Image: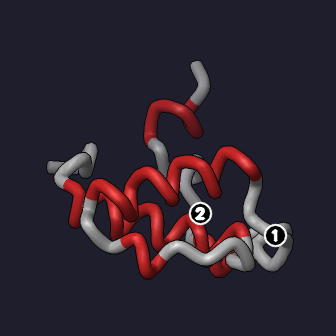
Amino acid sequence: MNTKASTGSNTQKDPDDWVSGDEPMTGAQASYLKTLCEQAQRPDLFDDNLTKAEASKLIDEMRKEAGVDKKA
């Protein structure tokens, strides 16, 4: 049994703790974030120069504002 997957305790790290968090965001992050910012009517928040960690945090925020939060 894979306890990490079943508990979820080690599957999601805080973006501030990511080893590669200070690298530029990926193309997938940029595309998704741009779409979310538009859906949330906040296109001004999109920035091509975000890091992976910054993009992840903003994606979480924009998911909530756009009403696509999985946790809801």
Looking at the rendered structure, the secondary structure element under dot 2 is: loop
Residue at 84% over, 68% down: 20
* Relative to 2, 39 lies left or right: left
The percent coordinates of residue 50 (x first, y second) are 69, 77
The percent coordinates of residue 12 (x first, y second) are 55, 55
Badge 1 density bin: few <14, some 14–19, many ≥20, Cα 10 Å: some
Dots 2, 1 in contact, CB < 8 A: no
| Distance of label 2 from label 1 (alpha carbons) | 18 Å
**Front-lying residue, 12 or 37:** 37
Residue under label 2: 13
Badge 2 density bin: few <14, some 14–19, many ≥20, Cα 10 Å: few
Residue at 40% over, 71% down: 43
Q: Is residue 22 above or below residue 12?
A: below
* Relative to 24, 53 lies left or right: left
Q: Amino acid at mark 1?
A: Pro
The percent coordinates of residue 9 (x first, y second) are 50, 52
- Disc marking residue 24: 1
Is label 2 or label 1 in front? 1
**Front-lying residue, 7 or 58:** 58
Residue at 29% over, 55% down: 39
Q: Answer with the quarter of the image where residue 7 lies.
A: top left
**Front-lying residue, 40 or 29:** 40
Q: Amino acid at mark 2?
A: Lys
Q: Answer with the quarter of the image where residue 21 lies.
A: bottom right
* Relative to 7, 69 lies left or right: left
